[in-house]
Image: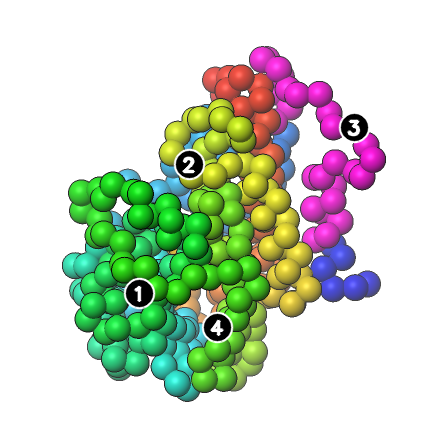
Amino acid sequence: MTRGFILRVAVAALAVPAGAQEAPPLGPGNLAFLDHVKNARLLAAGDLAGRNLADCSMPPVSAAPAGEPVVAPPTKVFDQLYYFGMNSVASWALVTSDGIIQIDSLDNAEEAQRIIIGGYRKLGLDPARMKYLVLTHGHDDHFGGAKYLQDAYHPRVLMSALDWDMVSKTRPRANFGPPPARDMDITDGRKLTLGATTLTFYLTPGHTPGTISFLVPVTDHGQPHLLSFWGGSALPRTLEPGGEIGRADSGLLTYRQSLERFIGIGEDAGADGYIANHPYRDQTFVDGKDDKITRNRARKPGDPSPWIGRSTYIRYMLISLECTEALTGWVQAGRPRVSQ
């Protein structure tokens, strides 16, 4: 059996076969989309049924936690990967032999200074070694702290050209930082090498016009693993063309096509785990009681990393596909109010 066979069969089962006619659009009163919600919940099987499924409800509900954000303890997650963030949004530091690649920058300068740079110092990292700052997409909860980091530590800042263009037209929101000065453009397939570490970026539009995703090579006590990093974890709120149901910068059809492509890329490369830019998606940090940071702290020698598990990674990706199908069907059915 070739690598990725099971997941590719599952993806194909959700797709329209080549040469087949598309099913007629759902109309008012047709609740067939609820089958996809049911499938997502079955795939979640309890351990993945946290906030990452919240916006699979119809009508969709924001998965973001309510209330004042809770800061996570700065944590060494793998031999070279560190988590600095809150229960609302994530920032990751990938340490290489020649410096650090920072991924996303939280909401604003104060958070970047207190949580990212403060976390560096608590864990013995030197912020002067931050060589690159990768922004997964152009929403201010990911780029809000970037200008501070850019001005203070001078990393090269990377984002896709489409999202650089988008943020240049975005009106700053209260409590969120302004975009950084435009620097490097990420193109599809672009490689970033620092020391012995190489990241390959893929344009995966849908959440925003230029969302990027990539695979992160890490080791856990010397054992190699490959993490899937899907850059736009929240479902968009539009069905192209139009069909506005809330904030969105791209659309569902594009999102699904990108997701299917990136799943295939991860399968071909042998991904066996995943991380996200919102910690309630991958359960990195939720409340400090039952999340991966907590379980990681309680690991005994020889225990596997809570971020690693091929079957869990596959289920996570399939849940995303099912929820995309559910939202598409709900919009096509006229956005009915349903009890689930």
- 242 or 218, which lies in front? 242
Residue 230 higher or lower than 130, as above or below: above
Mark 1 vs mark 4, CA separation in Å: 22 Å
Counting residues from the start of the chain, the first of labels 1 and 2 encountered is 1
Front position among marks 4 and 2: 4
Which of the two discs, 1 and 4, labels the residue nearer the N terminus? 1
**Which residue carries the number 3 mark?**
21
Contact? badges 1 and 3 (CB < 8 Å) = no
- Residue assigned mark 4: 192
Residue pictured at 60% horizontal, 65% vertical: 271
Q: Is residue 281 on the magenta stretch? A: no
Q: Residue at x 25, y 41 (%)?
A: 171
Helix, strand or loop status at disc 3:
loop
Helix or strand or loop: what does disc 2 sit on?
loop
What's the amino acid at mark 1?
Answer: Phe
Please name the residue that numbered disc 2 is placed on. Answer: 248
For marks 1 and 4, give the one nearer the viewer: 4
How many marks on residues?
A: 4
